[in-house]
Amino acid sequence: MRTYRNSLKALRDSALAHALEKNPDLASLARELGAIVHRDAQALGHGLRDLRVRNRGFERWLLARRARPGASVLVMAWPPGYSSPSHDHAGLWGIELSLYGALEVESWSRASTSEPWHLRGRDWLGPGDATWFDADPPYMHRCRNLSRHETALTLHVYGGDLDDYASYAQTQSEPFWRGAPQRARIAGPLRV
């Protein structure tokens, strides 16, 4: 039987291998990561149980980081009912995949920074499901744990470090949004 550490290592190694390209095939990466999650769902759910029962709020855990080419792999814990503010990804490409639980992802895009944001759609992610975004077009989204009782866990792969980003609040003159700079916090490293 595979341990969750073997599963995390497989997820990390797959993500870093795909991230060797400047513009990786995110659909292919999503399929590969999803297959690992489906194969190892029981081990991941049991092994990451501590992150699900901590009750310390939203947390980001670093699984891997590489400088050149830039890539980071994180596991995030979403408390019951938690919703992130609408936020961008500082021009990075990214993929977000559910490991445990279910997440709703509401996304917006715009043609340029001088134009308003337009709702692109909503995705609902269960274990092994992913959504992704390219680095080129301006993009933001808001994520929400759909459970009122359980912490959800997700895997995030970015084309660099997401240290600084912007969160957005809608203004009274819709469809415009006001951005505010943010600094990402890491709760700690995940050991594999």
Image: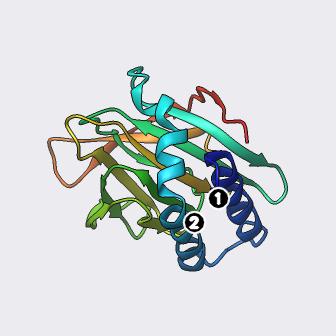
For the question of whether residue 89 can be seen, the reply is no
Q: Amino acid at mark 1?
A: Leu
Q: Is residue 192 left or right of residue 44?
A: right
Q: CA distance from mark 2 to mark 1?
A: 7 Å
Q: For the residue labelled by badge 2, is the local secondary structure a helix, a strand or a loop?
A: helix
Residue shown at 52%/38% (left/top)? 48
Image quarter of residue 128? bottom left
Residue 163, image x, y percentages: 62, 38
| Secondary element at tag 1 | helix
Quarter containing the C terminus: top right
Label ID, residue 11: 1
Mark 2 crowdedness (10 Å alpha carbons): few <14, some 14-19, many ≥20: some
Query: Which residue is pictured at 39% across the width and 24% down the height?
Result: 57
Q: Is residue 167 left or right of residue 121?
A: right
Image spot of residue 134 (x, y percent): 54, 69
Viewer-nearest residue: 81 or 141 = 81
Residue position marked by numbered label 2 in the rendering: 36
Task: Please say if 155 is above or below 82.
Answer: below
Q: Nearer the viewer, residue 46 or 192?
A: 46
Q: Position of residue 172 (x, y in %)?
A: 14, 41
Whichever of labels 2 and 1 marks the residue nearer the N terminus, that label is 1
